[in-house]
Amino acid sequence: MASAPSPEVLRAPLVVEFPFTRSLGPVQSAFLTGLRERTVLGVKTKDGRTLVPPVEYDPVTADEIRDLVEVGATGTVTTWAWNHEPRRGQPLDTPFAWVLVKLDGADTALLHALDVSGPDAVRTGMRVRIRWAAERTGAITDIACFEAYEGDDVGEVGAHSGEFSEPVTGIVAAARLDYTYAPGRAQTAYIKALSEQKTVGERCPSCRKVYVPPRGACPTCGVATAKRVEVGPRGTVTTYCIVNIKAKNLDIEVPYVYAHIALDGADLALHARIAGIPYDQVRMGLRVEPVWTEGARFPDHYRPTGEPDADYDTYKELV
């Protein structure tokens, strides 16, 4: 007898992205400002090693180090790997080699891209030089890439004050992760039920608790769960917070309330926004129900039902 086909598991592209802002100390400030001025700076340790890129503390002794030195814009490849399919945001949009380059005058290697015709054109020990970006702002991308170099000169090498006009004091780096998310069997069923304005969890066959959203296994017992249970739609606020900072691209006026809500029949609270009541009147034990907007795949928010507050003993295990 042929088995029934498995339900389709959902998949969707997902992007997690945020700007990371950090201030720079004197060493990193000098390094990035130097790149803007086509100058590569390293830092010299007490035992005479020159570290490029520079760090503020010796990775061996943990001593603070501030003695800046200028190294050459030429160097030697110490190792490499071929990148046959560049991704968004990488230094070059055509295939290139990732290389570790020990710049002349440095004792450590700098990671960057090498622009060559193919993997046969790369070798450990080859001489390379920096190709500077046409427009430089004080970032590692001021080095556009490395390129093959046949010359013998090593450029400027020696002590440097690290002083430049209009130094770079901070940077903003965009952190981004692109991937395809597959929620799995349990969460696929949960998401599909939400599209029908229902909330389903799964019951553990051992402890009998119902978990929402379901994960396919009981987090307490560690056994697989498969029995689906519809819960809610009403629930109880177990705890909450008042949000006073407006999030970018979120069209909700502050202050507003985000709460943990134990849906009736569930043994795990989920989180959602509370509306339909002044923020300073939200309280633990408040009975709420979901509010759906047309075409939405999840509740827009929860609002008070008008019922008496739940007794603390009925939800204390879910706080």
Image (tube, grey):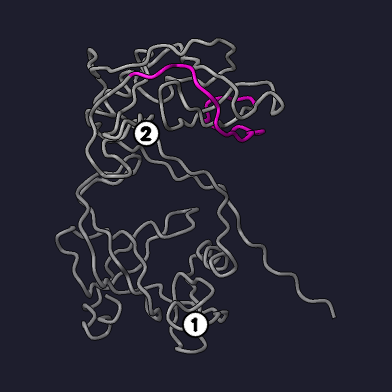
Observer-nearest residue: 146 or 66? Answer: 66
- Residue 238 sits in which quadrant? bottom left
Give the left or right position of residue 299, taking residue 129 as reference. left
Give the left or right position of residue 130, taking residue 5 as reference. left
Q: Give me the residue at 44% from left, 72% from top.
A: 212
Q: Secondary structure at mark 2?
A: strand
Q: Classify 10 Å Cα crowding around label 1: few (below 14), some (14-19), many (20 and above).
A: many
Q: Position of residue 52 (x, y in %)?
A: 38, 29
- Residue 50 sits in which quadrant? top left
Q: Nearer the viewer, mark 1 or mark 2?
A: 2
Observer-nearest residue: 240 or 296? Answer: 240
Q: To which residue does mark 2 refer?
A: 173
Is 235 situated above or below 153? below
Quadrant the N terminus occupies = bottom right
Which amino acid does the dot numbered 2 rest on? Answer: Ala
Q: Give me the residue at 48% from left, 32% from top.
A: 111
Q: To which residue does mark 1 refer?
A: 203
Quadrant the C terminus occupies = bottom left
Q: CA distance from mark 1 to mark 2?
A: 44 Å
Q: Residue furthest left?
A: 280
Q: Which contiguous range is marked in magenta?
A: 70-94
Observer-nearest residue: 24 or 195? Answer: 24
Q: Position of residue 181 (x, y in %)?
A: 55, 54
Observer-nearest residue: 48 or 257? Answer: 48
Residue 203 magenta: no
Q: Give me the residue at 23% from left, 53% from top.
A: 256
